[in-house]
Amino acid sequence: MNPMINTTSHVIKDLEQQRFFKLVCGASLTDVEMIERLTFIFTLAGAHVIDLAPSADVIFAARRGVEKAIELPETSKPLLMASIQLDKDPHFRKAEVDYNLCDLCSACVKVCPTEAFKIENKKFIYSIEKCYGCGICPQYCHVNALSMVDTKPSPKETLTEMISLGVKSIEFHFGKNFQKVEEIWTDVRDLVKKLDLISFSIGSDLLSDEDIKKAADLCYRLAGSRIILQCDGTPMSGGFHNNSKKSKIGNNSNNSSLHVARIIQEEKLPVYLQISGGTDENSFTEAIDSGVNINGVAIGSYARKLLMPYLTDLEENLNEAVMIAKTLVDSVSGISCKI
Ligand code: SF4
Ligand code: SF4
């Protein structure tokens, strides 16, 4: 057993019972109002972990959401987890605008899922804090005024800041440079000892099947047993491609979280497998039905897309918003498959 896992027994129990649900607010989303409201709703709905951008403002906003929710009876506190990149990873980027090129065509305004763009009085307005780095808007800009830039947070500085804020659950985004990951890990080893829960996000977008295995083995070697390995399919894709009831992981495409989980499962490591990236309310059942014995599911852009219409007037819409969130949380139902 990993000695680092000590103050998180309720989360470990949820993982063991294959009921673990994580809301992903987004590793780059810094819209504090949205984060506070999402955290409030998903705390009421019973989420076990809320995954956040590694920023003090974001952590404080999430805490406000949690505190407000636990004033209500029978509400449990979720763990707040911050995402940190070890190597270059698409979760850590923001859209950038070249205002000189923009001709106010409004194509990006229509496609951005978080309403980061507005045109008012013939002026283009970009609220960068709303951008979570999905990468969709540059594809719609006919004059190439939009591009994606890495946010480049330093792992050691970010981890130090998060620990000083009392955040002891961290998700490390693996990237694809194995040597760099090992070097950074050596650098942060003493800090890591202060953590209660460690997750690694391993993405199929970045790694071949063989490298997914190697990445999983390396994470286990670096951090030990009872860590979470997040099997990431197509990052941040839920809000765009997942409009039907059928989850995209059901397609068994090579680029899916289910595929990553299946590969890692074959390694038989004493770790928890949790899928993410293109996930929705069908994902847990589909994984179990196809023999992939996952411990939990994280849902991000799909959850945010479902909840967006309710966030503006939350007092009016709270019951409906919590019901929708609960459908997602309860979809991870703990029915173990026999393999
Ligand atoms: S479309 Fe995606 S990348 Fe572009 S601003 Fe919106 S959230 Fe950011
Ligand atoms: S799509 Fe490009 S040109 Fe059109 S409003 Fe957006 S930034 Fe401006």
Image: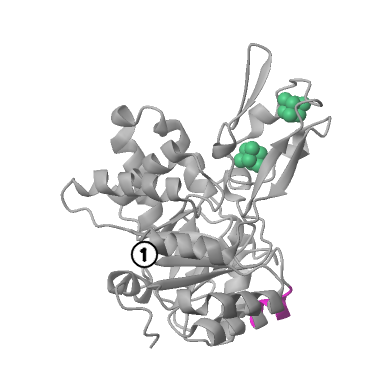
Residue 274 magenta-highlighted = no
Asked whether the viewer can see residue 286, the reply is: no
Q: Which of 6/16 is in front?
A: 6
**Within the image, what quadrant is residue 166 found in?**
bottom left
At x 58%, y 76%, the residue is: 187
Residue 209 magenta-highlighted = yes
Can you give x and y, in whole percent of width and height, for residue 86 in the image? 62, 68
Badge 1 amino acid? Ser
Q: Is residue 108 left or right of residue 217?
A: right
Disc 1 crowd, CA 10 A, few/some/many (<14, 14-19, 20+): some
Q: Which of 156/27 is in front?
A: 156
Q: Is residue 128 left or right of residue 317?
A: right
At x 40%, y 72%, the residue is: 197
Can you give x and y, in whole percent of width and height, for residue 171 in the image? 50, 66
Q: Which of 173/74 is in front?
A: 173
At x 59%, y 36%, the residue is: 128
Secondary structure mostly seen in the magenta stretch: helix
Asked whether the viewer can see residue 59, the reply is: yes
Q: Is residue 94 left or right of residue 159?
A: right
- Magenta region, residue range: 208-213
Q: On the image, numbered disc 1 is attached to which residue?
A: 333
Write down which quadrant ligand 1 falls in.
top right
At x 53%, y 51%, the residue is: 26
Can you give x and y, in whole percent of width and height, for residue 37 in the image? 37, 40
Q: Residue furthest top?
A: 121
Give the quadrant of the N terminus: bottom left
